[in-house]
Amino acid sequence: MSALILDSERPSSFTRLPHELLTAIVNEFDVFVTDESDPESTPGDQPTPKALHPDIAAFRSVCRLFRTLVYGMRFWYADDVHVTALLPSTRTQTTAADDDGYIDWQDEVDELTNHLKDELFVRAIEKRTKWRFKHTPLLLAIFEHVPSFRRNVTSVVLNFPAYPNGESIYPKSAITASIAILGNCPNIASVEIVHLREMLSLKLLAISCPSLKSLRIMDMGQDYDGGELGGNLEGLTTLEEVDIRGFGPDIRETPFLPVSSVATLTRLSLLSRWGFDSAYTSWDVLDNFVNLKSLSISPLICEITRWIPRAKNDILDLRFILIDRGDIGDFWSAGDINWIASQFDELMSSNCLRGLREFRFGVAGFFLSDDQWIQLANTLLRAILNHQVFLEKLVLTASSHHASMALLPKLEHLKTLRWHELDVPSKRQFSASEVKRRIHAAFESSPAEPVIEVFPHYDFQYPQFGLLVD
């Protein structure tokens, strides 16, 4: 196609084609150059868009008609990509990147600023409402050169990268500076922060984005360069979702709970690889969140298991990881297994879980034997299958050796089952295909026909959150 449109003797006849046909042809082009080796990509995700595809850039450069066609395409404002992916870059990833694969941010800013001098480029992107930025200067460039950005933007993702050794490649105050800029954008309803590596004031966030409905902080780091949260979310009265992941044991949970949004919050997700410092948290405050429908907690703590039976909410979506980490914080220990076994059946029969539609759980630990974890995982599974017969989606860790598999036909409404087989000694380990066959056999007597995925030999001793989130 590129050869056809660039042949100097043929463009005149090609441009006489109907406008609708030309548009259809352009829409068949690959829009982006992608990078499947991107360090932020995870297995199963779509490859990360990196730059505008050379064919699109070439087509745009042929003549005024083709330029207009390209700038009329929806991807300019519809696709959820980094702003740098919208640049028709002439540089290759090899020449533009350093030895660690990261492109110098100043080069990206210079290139973006150059394209912002193009009126058609600005018109093409000004309708965009969802934006992703890799550096504060990129946000500032858009803020200064796209006047409608302040009025139109409703969703911002600040995904600032770090080198593989954990060192930041942006100033320590970059996230804070970006939030301050967003204070000039009155319609922002969603903010997502990835790779927080600084102290962030939640109060500043509340002041800058008073209409916020969704807040996500995806990774606060686990090393010397990790991030911290200060202040609280007081003043935000319309929050519907709060999702904080990856914080360490020194982070206080109280600021995460938006007490001024008790009437609107429907989803709360607090995921730590280590735990919660209960001395700084009164979980009784959850009683006030009368419209909470979805709760994700890692690790599951005693306070939450005591709250669920008395909760007045109708929980539709419950997710947790049960962790034993020895003497670190407020975690389960080997001596708690009998208590869990005796109490979990009652927990699953709680009134607030009668309408549960999605349930995800995992077990993990350093100090319990394989047999103990298999026993515990299947104690949980048996309680779930006895009481949660209306589940539509179940994601779990369990052992297909256990007799509780025979209870799977009770889930007559199940649409999706993701089974993570517990890692057991190799002599007892089934292959993924064998586990899947056993699950299908269990459902032969059930009207349910769920989509079944099996992930064997999963190591849950240091849990990742992939089991709890898509």
Image (cartoon, rainbow, N blue to C red):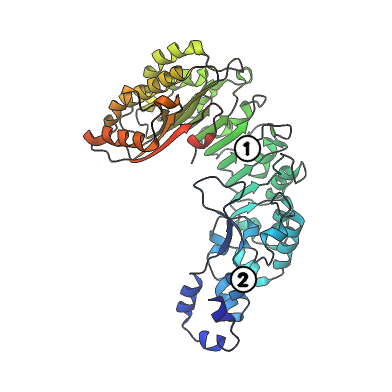
Which residue is nearer to you in this view: 119 or 44?
A: 44
- Near mark 2 (Cα within 10 A), the count class, few <14, some 14-19 or many ≥20, is some
Q: Which residue is rendered at x = 60% and y = 31% of the image?
A: 256
Q: Secondary structure at mark 1?
A: loop
- Indicate which disc, 2 or 1, sits on the residue closer to the N terminus: 2
Q: Which residue is rendered at x = 71% and y = 62% of the image?
A: 112
Q: Which residue is mark 1?
A: 219
Which residue is nearer to you in this view: 30 or 218?
A: 30
Which residue is nearer to you in this view: 180 or 8?
A: 8
Q: Is residue 264 visible?
A: no
Q: Which residue is mark 2?
A: 57
Pick out the residue farthest to the front: 427
Instruction: Decide: is 24 above or below 279.
Output: below
Instruction: Decide: is 240 above or below 93.
Output: above
Q: CA distance from mark 2 to mark 1?
A: 35 Å
Number of numbered tags placed on the structure image: 2
Please tell me in which quadrant of the rendered image residue 162 appears. top right
- Near mark 1 (Cα within 10 A), the count class, few <14, some 14-19 or many ≥20, is some
Instruction: Decide: is 184 above or below 231.
Output: below
Amino acid type for the residue under numbered disc 2: Ala
